[in-house]
Amino acid sequence: MSLRERKEIQEMLRWRVVRLLPIFILLFWLIMMGWLARRTGLFERIASPTSPDDRGSEVSLPTDDWYGIYAPQDLQVGFLNLVSIPGMREGEEGVQVRVSCRMDLMFLGTEADITVLGSAWLSKTQGLTEADVRIRSQDVEWRVEAQAKGDTVDVQIHTGGETLPFVLPASSFRSVWSPNTIAGFDLPDLHPGEETTVETLDPFSMGTTRARVKCLGEEEVNVLGRSTHAKVFSIEMNTMMTRAWVAQDFSKQGKGEIIQLELPVGLLLKKIRPEDALVAPTAEAKESLFHLAAILPSGLTPTRGARRMVLQVSGVPSGMMLPADDTQNVQGDGRVVVRQLDPPQEDGVRPVGGPEWASALESDVLVQTGHPVIQQTVKDILGEEPGIWSSALRIYEWVWENIQKEMVPSIPSALEVLESRVGDCNEHTVLFAALARSAGIPTRICLGLVWSEENQGFYYHAWPEVCVVLPNGSSCWYWMDPTLGQPIADATHIKLASGGVRDWFSLLPFMGRLEIDVLELE
């Protein structure tokens, strides 16, 4: 690997925090969820829920709430503004919701400003019927539009000059938000030690899930320059835990109001005055988010190119396990052994296919396996090459040599990467997956961590793995890394999940919690 290529890769790792942009989509949904909940009657009284006819009646006056976004050490890095405007649309009552969010980040000297602008319409009888969210970072913009139509919701993601459409069931978009279908509770009515569950939106699947809510106790919180007595609640959903502080004396409607919210990614939202949103984050505040994008290990210092690494991993969320495969062995005591595999001695033959290979060969809105341009590119790369491993190597070499190593903070699309020929680990990985699957090679996307020698930490990373099926019937999944120039990924990779780029959300429960002790290194 040349010095220039090494510098390009290291610079790309510097931008890894920007690649965590999907986190801020989740932030948007979490905050919007909690805010709409208390505005539309989700947090109604446990003992005596109101009748369906009464739900939604609380939304009668416009609201305008401001929250500061704080990194560790109480350093402000941005703001969130939530506005509701009751009104009529096509003869039906409802509420228009507007969300504005801005974060100013800096990672090892690199600026990354993120802006989220969103709007939605909440019908009194139908719930959420449409939403429009824009996310900007530097010169890149995403736009997500969604509109309920009958039993389905049409969703369009606009990024990089492309529109990626897909369809969701209406139940995942409407039912959770509908004031007429939610039997919720009023957080302030819970006493310390009491708990309940509520149906809510799952931002991973855009479907419904159950959230467990418990009152942890009471404490004094400094908000808006004064000490305020608040109840503290934990909210657990899909192995993710957050905490909310609710105070009575801030309520405009005689009910408790969320004055502080702790997010799973290590950020804190705190009620502020509108003028406080204009405070410019300090360099210290921007740099304080370093821990969100890095895990600094204890023990031995890893070295790029390691063949074997033994780790003690702690902080794995309850109910979750690290994946085990041919490369990564996970033991019950938290020890993880990662080894770099030797190349296969025999070249594999392409499997006939079947249910066991379906997910590793399928096409989707980001990995366009069946697109004619992808298929023609594969033919140009492989020619008549028949073997799985030799084909995988040719695709790896083509992606490594033809895709410039550069951070592109957008939703990665294989077709877009093929046209632009630039990208970071996600772009390299989705293009490799599309090409390999089009060639009939079962391919999955690994999501996890990789060691950065320059920054002396593990950073979030994506890479592909391919399944080689040998003539004798045995099979083996090989990690490959076309971003870092490794035909077989070295042992400084740690897999946390696998699937697709949209499964980045599955990394959120790990963030800010994992600790790594490197025990052995070869």
Image (cartoon, helix red, strand yellow):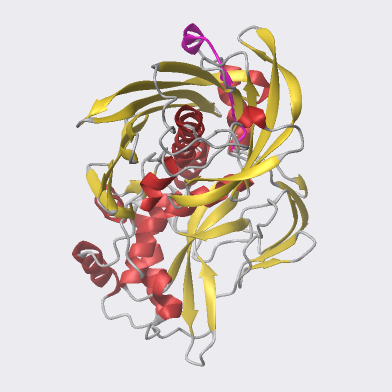
Residue 456 picture location, percent across and down: 66, 41
Residue 226 picture location, percent across and down: 67, 7
Q: Give the magenta-colored segment's residue range.
A: 265-278
> Which corner quadrant of the image does residue 342 belong to?
bottom right
Q: Residue at x 40, y 42 (%)?
A: 406
User: Quick one: 207 or 315, which is closer to the camera?
Assistant: 207
Q: Magenta segment: does it hold 276?
A: yes
Q: Magenta segment: does it hold 235?
A: no
Residue 29 picture location, percent across and down: 45, 37
User: Quick one: 501 or 491, which is closer to the camera?
Assistant: 501
Q: Residue at x 69, y 46 (%)?
A: 514
Residue 482, visible in the rendered structure: yes
> Which corner quadrant of the image does residue 124 belong to?
top left
Residue 423, visible in the rendered structure: no
Kindly give the residue lying farthest to the bottom in the view shown: 472
Relative height, residue 391 to residue 403 (above, below)? below
Image quarter where the C terminus lies is bottom right
Relative height, residue 330 to residue 270 (above, below)? below
Left/right placement of residue 447 relative to residue 137 reads right
User: Quick one: 43 or 278, which is closer to the camera?
Assistant: 43
Relative height, residue 336 to residue 70 (above, below)? below
Number of marks present in the image shown: 0
Residue 66 picture location, percent across and down: 49, 17
